[in-house]
Image (cartoon, rainbow, N blue to C red):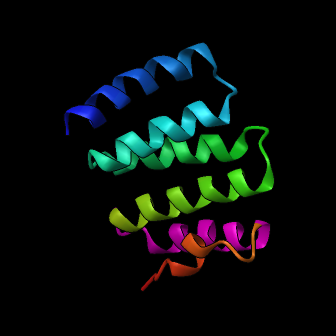
Amino acid sequence: RKLWDEARAVGEAAVYVDVTGGAAHMGYARALSALGAHDKAAFEAETAALCKMEKKDVAAAHVLAASSLLALKKNKEAAAHRDEALRLAPDDAAAKALKIP
């Protein structure tokens, strides 16, 4: 837990330094998700998906957004992110593994 708290603090600072950096938003989103702050994690993952990154990284951002939205029981939004991840990276194992009720 302590490491995730530290990662959250570093991530929060990183997104201010590199506002358009997808990697910074993804790192912050992962930490937030691990700490159970799924609403904020979804926002950061969605922001990362808008940044200029390789397709596989954008797909990973959509998967993280979908996972966070699932935790919030926002299944329709989660499905849209999962579907976009699969469109970008059809073989993405994490996207394929997402089960949305």
Is residue 69 positioned above or below 82 on the image? above
Q: Is residue 87 magenta?
A: yes
Q: Name the residue furthest left.
A: 1
Residue 15, percent from left and from top: 55, 23
Is residue 40 positioned above or below 95 on the image? above
Q: Is residue 1 magenta?
A: no
Residue 50, percent from left and from top: 71, 43
Q: Name the residue furthest front.
A: 3
Looking at the magenta stretch, what is its main secondary structure? helix
Residue 30 shown left or right of residue 3 in the figure: right
* Number of numbered callouts drawn: 0
The one nearer the camera, 17 or 43, is: 17
Residue 25 shown left or right of residue 72 in the figure: right
Residue 18 shown left or right of residue 77 in the figure: right
Residue found 27% across the figure and 44% down from its top: 35
Image quarter of residue 80: bottom right
Residue 36 shown left or right of residue 42 in the figure: left
Residue 87, percent from left and from top: 77, 72
Q: Name the residue furthest top.
A: 17
Magenta highlight range = 72-88
Residue found 46% across the figure and 42% down from its top: 29
Residue 31, percent from left and from top: 38, 40
On-image quarter of the C terminus: bottom left
Residue found 59% across the figure and 80% down from its top: 96
Residue found 78% across the figure and 66% down from its top: 88
On-image quarter of the N terminus: top left
